Amino acid sequence: MQIIRCTEENNDRLTEIWMLSVRRTLSDLDPGDVQFYARLFREEILERLELHAVQSRFGGELTGFIAMNGSKVELLVVHPHYQGQGVAGMLLDHVSQRGELAVDVGEQTPDVYDFYQSVGFIETGRSESDASGRSVATVHLLRPEFKAQTGAS
């Protein structure tokens, strides 16, 4: 597997991965919310953010992606068939060169919150709305910059 920088030609596959994730993770969203987030995905994620994806060894298929806004993880999505295979960890390791990483997680997705905690993110605060102003309780997480330990005693 390798990590690539995404271009416009990857947008269809990224959208497919994102939609599969939404249907699996947020199955209780009403159709209006799905349409709202689909528009937001196209306009904000695909068009404005820095995107990196993991490409499989066999066939070069994209298996997951991360959308970055500076050092903030705006979106991290792995195709359901590739979950549990280290794809998300590879993407986070790739962007960790930026130093400290931040992410916001909706309280309605406790599995996502648990994942980020398992890879070193800590809770730094909460708010009653998400970044788009919608009334969705949100948890703010931060992963401190990784500092290599020196061999000095």
Image: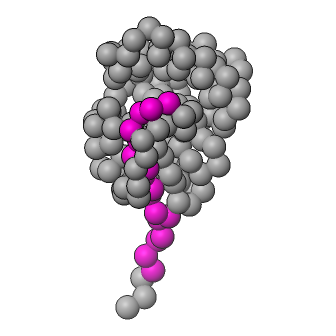
Q: Please report the residue visible at 55 percent of the width from the left and 38 percent of the height from the top.
A: 131
User: 29 and 3: which one is in front?
Assistant: 29
User: 31 and 116: which one is in front?
Assistant: 31
User: 74 and 59: which one is in front?
Assistant: 74
Q: Is residue 137 shown to the viewer in this render?
A: yes
Query: From which residue to which does the magenta span run?
Result: 134-150
In-image side of 100 versus 49 (left or right): left
In the displayed structure, would residue 122 be above or below residue 74? below
In-image side of 151 versus 115 (left or right): right
Query: Which corner quadrant of the image does residue 89 belong to?
Result: top left
Q: Please report the residue visible at 57 percent of the width from the left and 56 percent of the height from the top.
A: 97
In the displayed structure, would residue 122 be above or below residue 36? below
- Please, which residue is most extreme toward the top here? 31
The C terminus lies in quadrant = bottom left
Query: Which corner quadrant of the image does residue 21 belong to?
Result: top left
Q: Is residue 87 shown to the viewer in this render?
A: no
**Image coords of residue 4 (percent x, y):** 61, 34
Q: Please report the residue visible at 65 percent of the width from the left and 28 percent of the height from the top.
A: 44
139 falls in the magenta region: yes
In the displayed structure, would residue 52 be above or below residue 98? above
77 falls in the magenta region: no
In-image side of 69 versus 143 (left or right): right
In the displayed structure, would residue 49 be above or below residue 37? below
Q: Please report the residue visible at 32 percent of the width from the left and 16 percent of the height from the top.
A: 28
Q: Main secondary structure of the magenta part?
A: loop
**Image coords of residue 91 (percent x, y):** 49, 41
**Image coords of residue 46 (percent x, y):** 65, 25
